[in-house]
Structures are given as C-alpha cells and as structure tokens.
C-alpha cells in the first residue's frame, strides 16, 4: 500500500491551511521536542520541517526571529547551533499546551475570577504582556483592563502574575452573578465576550478536515513514520490555533451540542494513532550534542487523559535501529515510504 490518500490529504491540507513558519516551529517544539528535552540541532529541525513544506532558509529566518522574541535560545557549538526553549518560551508553551492536552470543563460553582488592571500601574509593554498571557489562559476582556474567567485556575493565574511582574499591582477578585438584576442572559453575554459562534464554526471545520485521516488510520492504513509526524503536527497546529481562542468555559455556559467536545475527542483519537509512527520519525531525525535525542518523559503519555506508551516506545526503538543501519523507513503496516516534499 502506498498510502496515496494520506499523501494527497497532506498536500491538500498544506495548500489550504495558512501556516506561518514561526508558529509551526513553536507547535513542533511544544508538542514534539519539549518532552524529549526541549532542544535539537538546527540541521535536524530543517530536515524535520521539510515535509511540511518549509525550506531551510525559512527555518533559519524563523528560529532567528524566535530567539529575538525570547522563545528560543541558540547554543553555537563549532559551526553548528543547538536551539532550545528559553524559560519564557517554556512558560508560554506550558500555559497554552496545558489547555490543549488537559481535560477541560470541570463542574462550575458559579463564581467568576476577575483581574482588574488599574490605570497607570503598569508600563505599556508590561500591561500588554499581561493582557496577552491572560487571553492565552482563556480570560475574556469585559472592558478595557477588566478580564474575567468562570473557571480560571488560581495556580495558573498566580504564575502569570508572577512571571509578568504584575503581582501586587493588579486587583484579583471573585464575583457571582446576581440573578434578576441584569437583563442580558448570561449565555448571551458569554457568547458576545468570547465570540463563541466563530469558535464553534472553527471546531466544525476542524472535525470535517481531520475526520478522513482518522477513519483511514482507524481502518488500518497507518501510513509511514514521516506521514504520521506530519499528520500529528498539522493536527496539533490546527487544534492549538483554535484552543488559544477557546476560553474553556464550563459546560453549563455552552450549548448542549457544543462542537468543541466532538473536536477534542477526534483530536485525542487521531493523536493516539499517529503517536507511535511520529515518535519514530522524530527520534530518527533529531539529535543533540550528546548524541541521540533523549527518550520522551512521562508527560507525553499523560496527554489527553492518558495515551498508551508501549507501542510508541517499541516503534521508536525499531526506528533507531533502522537509522543506525541506513535501512530505508518502512510504513507502519508494511507499505512504501512517503516522498519527502519540500517547497519554498
């Protein structure tokens, strides 16, 4: 089997989804590289991104920009460089990816967590950094410098305030709705502040786009390791893009048929199916100055409520051995390897 339908799907999706190289590199670092120590040689990154349509020049330009933006740091070793996440980059990724992989929608007690930034207490740059991090945590802007979340975590908020130097400079309050006082139904207010109609449309499109490859893999057409890595990356890249705008509101504030639930279930299932092959490709492609990329830590297999590690570890070990002998990669079900496509 040549896995041509997977290959065609990848080509079509890469042409249809607007993929910014900077953002794609952040997705790969956060999803794939961070569990393996968070760093890799630049040459390996270039090879890893090639089948996603990103050429070497674009990778070099993007990692340089990401170092300027304090996402990545470079460690020159001779004429080569290793790139890894900075503490600020790791913090941003931890905040965002916790919302992607953790199971949301815990029971709601009816309380709102409020953050109010008084005028003049923060410089413009610091205020913007705080605003950005609050939005990443799912807070909604009720008014200028007034943010609210019905299910915000205290620990996450404390971390945001400390990391942005805003603790002891902003007001953090709890609030409850006074029934019978306001005329606008609570769900209407929520939809207006968080633009849920647009978010729902994005979730529906996500499910329509990734439904076919889920069916193919579930039916036994697993593709080869490189295809699995590309599928996994595009899956998380698109899901991450939506999740960063999803406030993770309690179910009681959402419609009964909220499409985000269907999209999350699909993402978890497809992620689990692509994980063994994608891990094999990752470990065969990237390396660090000490040698091979470290094995993934336990956090990788706790994602989406827990994903079995055994098959992924076994496939990755096989791929390591293949890399050492120079044997060409095989498809997971015995088919032919995918072509390595590059484009500017």
Image (tube, helix red, strand yellow):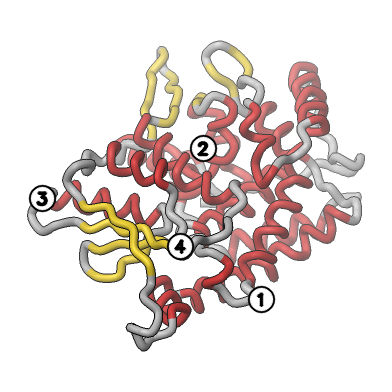
Q: Looking at the image, is mark 4 or mark 3 earlier in the sequence? A: 3
Q: Earlier in the sequence, mark 1 or mark 4?
A: 4
Q: Are marks 1 and 4 in contact (CB under 8 Å)?
A: no
Q: Who is closer to the viewer here, 127 or 184?
A: 184
Circles 4 and 3, Cβ within 8 Å, touching? The answer is no
**Which numbered tag is attached to residue 245?**
4
Residue drawn at 46 percent across, 65 percent down:
110
Q: Quadrant of residue 291?
A: top right
Circle 1 crowding by C-alpha within 10 Å: few under 14, some 14–19, many from 20: few
Figure check: 184 above or below 211: below
Is 215 on the left or on the right of 265, as rendered? right
What residue did someone put label 3 on? Answer: 121
Instruction: Identify the residue shown where x is 65% and y is 28%.
Output: 298
Q: Which mark is residue 74?
A: none
Which picture quadrant has residue 200?
Answer: bottom right
How many residues crowd mark 4 within 10 Å: few (<14), some (14–19), many (20+)? Answer: some
Which of the labelled discs sits on residue 257, or is there none? 1
Label 3 crowding class (10 Å Cα cut-off): few <14, some 14-19, many 20+?
A: few
Q: Are marks 2 and 4 in contact (CB under 8 Å)?
A: no
Callout 2 secondary element:
helix
Residue drawn at the location 60% of the way across and 59% of the way down: 14
Against 191, residue 304 (above or below) is above
Q: Which residue is mark 2?
A: 29
Q: Is residue 205 visible?
A: no
Front-most of 99 and 210? 99
Spatial distance from mark 2 to mark 4, Cα to Cα? 20 Å
In the image, 13: left or right of 270?
left
Q: Secondary structure at mark 4?
A: loop
Label 2 vs label 4, nearer the camera: 4
How far apart are labels 1 and 4 at the CA level? 19 Å
18 vs 12, left or right, is: left
């Amino acid at each position: 089997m040549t896995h041509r339908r997977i290959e065609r799907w990848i080509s079509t999706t890469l042409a249809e989804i607007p993929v910014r190289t900077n953002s794609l590199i952040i997705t790969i670092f956060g999803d794939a590289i961070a569990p393996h120590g968070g760093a890799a040689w630049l040459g390996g990154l270039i090879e890893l991104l090639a089948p996603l349509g990103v050429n070497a020049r674009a990778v070099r330009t993007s990692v340089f920009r990401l170092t300027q933006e304090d996402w990545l740091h470079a460690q020159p070793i001779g004429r080569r460089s290793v790139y890894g996440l900075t503490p600020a980059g790791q913090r941003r990724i931890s905040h965002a990816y916790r919302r992607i992989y953790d199971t949301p929608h815990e029971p709601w007690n009816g309380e709102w967590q409020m953050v109010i930034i008084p005028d003049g207490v923060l410089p413009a740059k610091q205020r913007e950094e705080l605003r950005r991090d609050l939005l990443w945590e799912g807070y909604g802007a009720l008014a200028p410098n007034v943010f609210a979340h019905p299910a915000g975590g205290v620990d996450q908020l404390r971390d945001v305030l400390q990391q942005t130097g805003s603790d002891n400079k902003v007001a953090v309050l709890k609030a409850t709705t006074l029934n019978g006082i306001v005329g606008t139904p609570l769900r209407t207010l929520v939809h207006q502040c968080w633009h849920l109609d647009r978010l729902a449309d994005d979730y529906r499109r996500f499910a329509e786009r990734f439904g076919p490859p889920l069916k193919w893999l579930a039916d036994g057409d697993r593709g080869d390791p490189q295809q699995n890595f590309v599928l996994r990356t595009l899956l998380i890249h698109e899901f991450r893009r939506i999740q960063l705008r999803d406030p993770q509101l309690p179910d009681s504030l959402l419609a009964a048929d909220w499409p985000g639930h269907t999209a999350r279930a699909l993402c978890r299932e497809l992620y689990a199916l692509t994980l063994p092959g994608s891990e094999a490709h990752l470990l065969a492609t990237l390396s660090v100055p000490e040698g091979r990329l470290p094995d993934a830590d336990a956090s990788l297999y706790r994602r989406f409520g827990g994903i079995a590690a055994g098959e992924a570890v076994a496939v990755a070990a096989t791929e390591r051995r293949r890399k050492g002998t120079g044997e060409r990669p095989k498809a997971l079900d015995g088919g032919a390897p995918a072509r390595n496509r590059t484009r500017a």
